Amino acid sequence: MAVTATAALTCLAALAACSGPPKDSGTGSDFKLSASTPEARGEIDSFTWAVYAEPPTLDYTAAFDYPQNTILSNVCESLMRWTPGLTMEPGLAKKASNPDPRTWVYDLRAGVRFHNGKEMTADDVVYSLGRQMDPKNAAAWAQVFQNVASIRKTGPLQVTVKLKKSDSQFPQYMATAAGVVASKAGVEAAGKDYGTSGGLACTGPFKLGAWDKGQSIELDRFGGYWGRKAKSKKVVFRILTDPSARTNAMLSGEADGGYLIPTESYGRLRDSGVGSLYFGEGLTTVNVNVTNMRGPLGDVRVRRALSLAMDRSGFVRAGLGGAGTTSSSITPRAVWAAASEPTRKAALGALPPVKQDIEKARALIKEAGATGKTLTVATSPIGQDVSLLATAVQAAGTRIGLNIRLKTVAPNAFTALFTDPKAREGIDLFPYTSYYNISDPLDLLADFKTGAYLNFAGYSDKGYDKLVQEATAVYPRAPRMKIEAELQKQAADKVLWIPVAEWPTSVFLNKRITGAPTTISYMYYPWAADVGAAK
């Protein structure tokens, strides 16, 4: 059956629609969620944005962290698009059809031009998605394509994806960097330099401009953009690895705004009078990632003990500036909003306790024979949320008889922990802010499948793997979420990560600009195109 993308993906997007940001909903004494920032009133020549680290590359196949996606989302576009309301809509594909469970047909928009002037064709889509599947590229998004049998051009502006089996996640990921389309000619011309110099040969409202390594990255408005023209002629991303420097830049006007505001600066920025601090739905959890199960953490009792010893409330107050809620769930509660009451209860009703229990934790450590064992936790001066969480782990471990060592790494090296196995050598745990790429619980729960890209500790369980496969195969939302609830229960019971809190998206805008979305959508939505004059 051929239907529009909106209709074809209703069952997939409905969850996102239900889990979007509520209007002015109070969620605590220190913050409230806002659906958006005020709409821009006009154009501006440029604005400057603060980012905490320099992307090692802007190649879309490696776009798997905040710095890369914050920038790339404005330059490169995907077949589908995640909206500020965390729903999905057509992107470079004007229509998506699902004629049978193992087939997705994407009909492309006509007249879309790349930044190099060439017109987008089906050949570019086949090539771009193919790069994600090529083992030589070691793409961060390769797992998305694990069930893809073929990607073929079936018309000048039509691409057909054949799946090995039903895959409820694949069509959703086409709204992320996994679904980016770049010019085949442009990528091939750049060769090994693609993503690090020159253009990116994409279709977005901005094109890559000057890149002053270690200092800034500029984006220039693309005059040939197929969609709504960006309100700013230029965006300058200032690379400011020190949290105080980022805050001072926003206070002084050196930077007009930024996402991922240092938590220790919430009060200063909110009360400064130079702009506004907003919070929105982040679909984000703050966790302690377990990266090594070959040592003491291979015993689930040690992982449970560390979880029981964590002072979550203290961390939310100090590490998140009060803008967060304690949690023992590795999935944010918002992604379960569209589930039936029994399913939601199954997923969230039997989670481990949030409150500390030091005595029980000590007993578990003793029972496991782990008293005095050493664990190494990575930390970084990226922001208070990272450094204080690492310190909280050290405090918790020390209280229950473990020897916790902290290893400080630079912000850029900390980013490498997510993509480079060598960077994780000698590390047992590290603070991990996990954001959802799509609005489906399986987005994170699938990460604990054997061999998954983010399964850093190498956890493997055949029963868990089977449940992931079952959930992946089910398109209708209700039965899929029942399976996902069981996965959630197993992940929680095995303490595959140590959940600590849920954390909203934060964004600061000075009085000169407005229009940026408040939600986590900025990772894959061309948010900078909406930013313009506040007056």
Image (cartoon, rainbow, N blue to C red):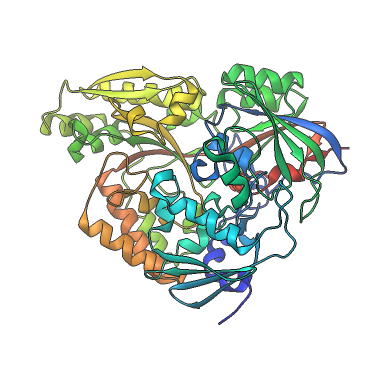
**Quadrant of the rendered structure where residue 257 is?**
top right
Residue 57 % position (x, y): 54, 34
Query: With 187 as the anchor, is 311 left or right in this view?
Result: left
Q: Residue at x 17, y 23 (%)?
A: 373
Q: Residue at x 38, y 64 (%)?
A: 472
Q: Nearer the viewer, residue 12 or 355?
A: 12
Q: Nearer the viewer, residue 309 or 129?
A: 129
Residue 323 % position (x, y): 56, 34
Establish if 397 lies above or below 484.
above
Residue 62 % position (x, y): 49, 41
Establish if 373 lies above or below 17.
above
Quadrant of the frame with the C terminus:
top right
Query: With 388 as the anchor, is 458 left or right in this view?
Result: left
Give the residue furthest to the bottom: 1
Residue 503 % position (x, y): 52, 39
Residue 326 visible in this rendered orientation of the protein? yes
Q: Residue at x 45, y 67 (%)?
A: 340
Residue 26 visible in this rendered orientation of the protein? no
Q: How many marks?
A: 0
Establish if 190 lies above or below 487.
above
